[in-house]
Image: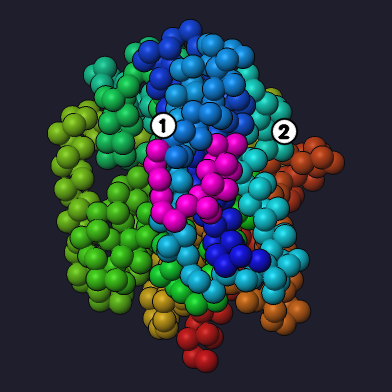
Amino acid sequence: MKSGLERKIIAFIIVATLAVILVHTESVLLRKSFFTTAPTAPYQLVAATLLALILSFLVGTKLRKFNYLAHLVISIVVTAPFVLIDPSLLGPMIAVVAVCPSAVLLSNFVISKLPPWLDGVAVKFPLRSVLWLLLALLMITQTTRLSSWLVDPAKDWQISSNDPFYAQHMCITAYVYAADLSRQGEDNIYNKKHYPGLTPDAKITTTIKNFKPDDPYQYPPQFLLLPRLAIALTSDFDVIKIFWFFLQALFIGFISLSLAQFIGGKIGASAALLIPLLWISFPVLSNFQYGQFHMVSILLAVGAMMWFAQGKHKLGGVTLAFAILSKVSPGILLIYFLVKRRWKEAGWTIVFCLVISLLALVVVGPKPFEAFISYQLPELQSGSAFSFAEAWPDYRDQFIAGNQSPFAFIFKLDALGISGMTQNLANVVHMIYTLFVVIIAFFAARIKGGRHIQLLVWLALLNLGALVSKGAWGDYIPIGTLLLMTYLLQEISGSLGQKLVMIVTGIFMFLSLGVLPLPGLDNPSVFISLAALGMLVMISFNLWVLFRARQMAKE
């Protein structure tokens, strides 16, 4: 086998995954701006992109150095037959020609960053290499399917069900609509009356094209900076949703690889090689489909901790601050800092929280802040901000199963016929769990150890903190736990008990078991029971990781 072939294949997988999304993104921009009658042609774009990249990689092995002109010619030659057969594809195919040569250049950079020990791995571990390649190809397949659907909703896309309740859902509509309402000068962007997700007959007043609002906006007003920037750049939701997918994929790939490099050694290498498995998990695919910010917030927070550890305090401070002001739950890391007396990290985070808040106040004005304090906070505290089951009674069981917070655990027990499960009891459970997580943060802050141990602590805290919300939705909340598991692969080779913990948790988290529909699990008592068990598994696993980290630190 030729030297460096493994690294070239890995680089191709990374670049091809991103290139398909970027080609789709550019094709949408071209259609909207210049080629208004051109077809969406998502599958033709995928075929042309992958073919151009494959040929470029084959030719690249014969070239001594990168030749942009050669790869440009390859892209033109590949796309020409598509245009000759259907001239209306000229506009979309320009995106392939624009992206592919630069993608090959990026692949050369990726190859240079991959460790040389990967060379020859396929010979030493043929079965593992084949399995990894299959996972990587599945990652490209799922990415192209989702990207194609985002470009053309008429195309087939589903994770586990074609029910529109699952297959058409998009959380990003809440961000965009709230930003739009804010720009229109609406006094209370949080009011349920604006959102069909809580008020089915809501009156829609939007300035965004190709847009159908759904979910209610639940985030602090500071988060509006992101969607306000988006709608300032374009008023077309078709552009926003595909561009956001590309940014998510790029950011997640960058942070995941950076974390693996930060940890280093076999643990970091195994975590990096498990990215395709993480990518195709149901929670990650759901997060991508929804445009949900949860995955980015987790990676922002853990990325901030990585940068703090590297002495990059300003970068760590601004990223952690935005994660906190977006999802709130990453604020558990501030308690962690204060207990450890890491004043510099806490200080920079607080400073940037103030800076971002002032910037948001200037951009969106005081109305969203006033509405958040006077209207939304009481709604969040009571849980009525998540009263989807009341608005959509036909999906009551699915909403009960989907909410993985300890607060909602009581309603699962009620749905299973257990008496005495009241709203008051749910509030008590929520308060106890919140206090419990704060206590755990004190415990976690006392765990010492190297980078690997600290990463386990950070992720476990973030995962436990995410469940404090009264609306912790199980179709994407497991992402942090799955990411954590990629850094615990050595536990599979441990005792029988450790193997069982990893396998059981992996199955529940990977499939969002009980939350997303699966064949044979359509009985409400079955999937609600599984969802309830899944919440307990998630909490138990992250607590177990903290105790394992403490043991590892002593070894």
- Comparing marks 1 and 2, which lies closer to the viewer? 1
Q: Residue at x 40, y 15 (%)?
A: 32
What amino acid is at disc 1?
A: Ala
Q: Is residue 382 magenta?
A: no
Camera-nearest residue between 74 and 472:
74
Query: Circle 2 — which element?
Result: loop
Q: Which residue is mark 1?
A: 98
Q: Looking at the picture, how far across and down is residue 530, in whole percent?
A: 73, 51
Q: Residue 4: which disc? A: none
Camera-nearest residue between 57 and 329:
57
Q: Residue at x 69, y 74 (%)?
A: 124
Q: Looking at the picture, how far across and down is residue 437, in whole percent?
A: 46, 64
Name the side, left or right, on which 297 lies relative to 476: left
Query: Circle 1 — which element?
Result: helix
Label 2 crowd (10 A; few <14 / some 14-19 / many >=20): some
Q: Where 373 sits versus 395, above or below?
A: below
CB within 8 Å, label 1 to label 2? no
Of pointers 1 and 2, the one earlier in the residue sequence: 1
Q: Which residues are magenta?
A: 51-69
Name the side, left or right, on which 292 lies relative to 339: right
Count of numbered circles on the image = 2
Q: Looking at the picture, how far across and down is residue 332, in whole percent?
A: 37, 61
Camera-nearest residue between 393 and 531:
531
**Quadrant (top left, top right, bottom left, bottom right) of the N terminus:** bottom right
Q: Residue at x 30, y 54 (%)?
A: 319
Q: Residue at x 57, y 41 (%)?
A: 55
Q: Where 168 sits versus 448, above or below?
A: above
Q: Looking at the picture, how far across and down is residue 155, in whole percent?
A: 64, 23
Q: Residue 161: which disc? A: 2
What amino acid is at disc 2?
A: Ser
Residue at the far bottom in the pictured view: 555
